[in-house]
Amino acid sequence: MALHPDRLFPIEVDARVIARRLFNTVESLPIISPHGHTDPRWYANDDAFADPASLFVKPDHYIFRMLYSQGVKLEHLGVPRQDGRPVEADGRKIWRLFAKYFHLFRGTPSRLWFEHAMETVFGIEDRLDETNADAIYDRIASRLAEPSMRPRALYKQFNIEVISTTDAATDELSEHDAILSSGWDGRVVPAYRPDAVVDASRADFLANVEDFVALAGTRLDYQGYLEAHRVRRAYFKQRGATSTDHGHPNARTADLPSSQASALFERVLKGVSPDDADLFRAQMLTEMARMSVDDGLVMQIHPGSYRNHNPSLFRAFGTDKGADIPRSTSYVEELKPLLDALGNDPRLTLILFTLDETSYSRELAPLAGHYPALRLGPAWWFHDSPEGMRRFRELTTETAGFYNTVGFNDDTRAYLSIPARHDMARRVDCAFLARLVADHRLDEDEAHEIAHDLAYRLAKRAYKL
C-alpha cells in the first residue's frame, strides 16, 4: 500500500516529469492553515490522544457519514447522543467496525488522507481490513503514548506555521489565552464565527443574542447589537484573529436603511418568519463587511449547505453528523447589495466559497475577476478532492487567474489529515501547472513561482498571516 511518489500527477510522461520538478520545490514548504476546525484545547492542554478511534473515526464526519450510508449506527461508532444514552466506548470495537467497512472508501479522498497519515506519521504501509485491524490498532495505540504524538509535537512535525480555529462569537477563548500564556512558540489563532447570534431561525436565537450583548456590555437594541459585534471582534483580534467566517444557507445580502434594519431586528427577537430570518442574515453579511473595512478582519462566506437534512439524526445526535447536503447557490444578484456598498473598497477582503460548482465559471470567477474586494476560496468540503480541485482550477483560472484565489485551506477537524490535505492540494496544483507548461501556455519558471504562491504565499497574504 506504500504511497506512490507520482500519485495525482499527470499520466502524460512530459507533464508528469514537469509536475515532479514543481512539486519538489513546494513539498516541504510550511503549512499555512488559515481556516479549520481543530480543537484549541488540543494545543492548550497538549494531552495525548486517547486511542486510534478517537483520533481517526469519532471526530471525522467524512468517515461516519459513509459508514452511516451503509447501515452502520452512529452509536456503534462512539458518536455521543443528545439524550445522553450510552454509545460504544470501546475504541478497539469502533476501530474493528471501521476496518470492516474500510473498502467503502475506495476512490475517495478520505482513503488518501488516511493512508497518508498511516504511512507518514505511523510508518504503516498495510491496507486496513478486518484481518489486520487489531495489529494496526495496537501499533497506533503504542505510538500515541509517546511525547512525539502530542498535539504540539505533531504541529512541529507537520511543519505548521500557523493554524486558525473557528470559534463562536460568545466564546471566551480561554484555550487561546492559555496557549498565548504558555510560552509555546506555535501560532494558533481564533476566527470569529457569529452564526449563532445572526441566524434568527434558530430556536435558541433570542437566548444567544441576550447572552451576546450581556457579554459585550451593550444594549439589547439594534445599535447595541451591532456594537456587541464590534466589541467581540476586537476581543478576538487581541488574541490573534485575522478572519471571520459566516456559514449561511445562501449568499444573499441586503443593505437596508438603519430604521428598517432596526425594525427587522426587533421583529426577529419577538418571533421570526422564514422571510425575516433570511433578510436578517442578508443584512448582517453587509454589516459584517462594513466592520471588516473598519477593523481589517478578512471575511469568509461559506454558503449553500442544507444543514441537518436528516431530522431524526439531528434530534438524536445534533449538528455536524454528516447530514449536511449541498444545494444550488447563486451569487450575482445575491451579493449585489453588499458589492454596491463595498465591492470596490480595497480595504475589504471577502473570500467566497461554494458547494455549487456550476457557479464557478458562470458567476464566481467573473465576480472575483472584477471586484477588488473579492477572492475565491479553494474547492470546499464535498469538493475537497483531487477531482474537485482540478475542476476548480479549470473553471476559474481562465477568468479569475491564480491571484484572485487564496491558495488552499484544509478546513478540517481531523488533525492528522492536515498534512495529507495540503500534500494533495500541492500535487493537484503542480499537475495543473505542469499541463500548462507542457501545452506551452506557461514557462516553467513562472509555474515554479505560481506553485509556491498557491502552496504558501497566497493564503498567508490573503488571510493577513
Image (cartoon, rainbow, N blue to C red):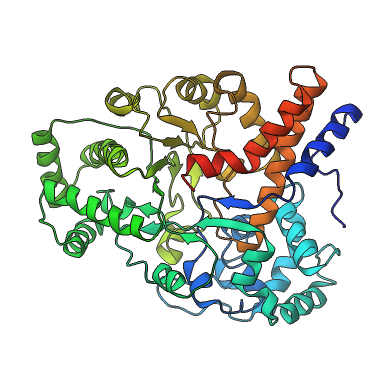
User: Eyeballing the image, is 422 above or below 213?
Assistant: above
User: Eyeballing the image, is 181 above or below 14?
Assistant: below
Question: For residue 311, what is the image quadrant?
Answer: bottom left
Q: Is residue 366 left or right of residue 247?
A: right
Q: Is residue 6 left or right of residue 89?
A: right
Which quarter shows the N terminus?
bottom right
Counting from the top left corner in percent of width and height, residue 48 is at 61, 79
In-front residue for pair 239/418: 239
Question: For residue 178, what is the image quadrant?
Answer: bottom left
Residue at horizontal 38 percent and vertical 61 percent from the top:
239
Counting from the top left corner in percent of width and height, residue 448 is at 73, 33
Is residue 110 among the parts visible in the rendering? Answer: no
In-front residue for pair 239/141: 239
Residue at horizontal 70 percent and vertical 42 percent from the top:
426
Q: Is residue 384 left or right of residue 28?
A: left
Counting from the top left corner in percent of width and height, residue 125 is at 85, 63
Counting from the top left corner in percent of width and height, residue 415 is at 61, 62
In-front residue for pair 37/134: 37
Residue at horizontal 54 percent and vertical 44 percent from the top:
460
User: Eyeballing the image, is 415 above or below 340?
Assistant: below
Is residue 295 among the parts visible in the rendering? Answer: yes
Q: Please state the total of marks drawn on the protein image.
A: 0
In-front residue for pair 317/298: 298
* Farthest residue, direction right: 13
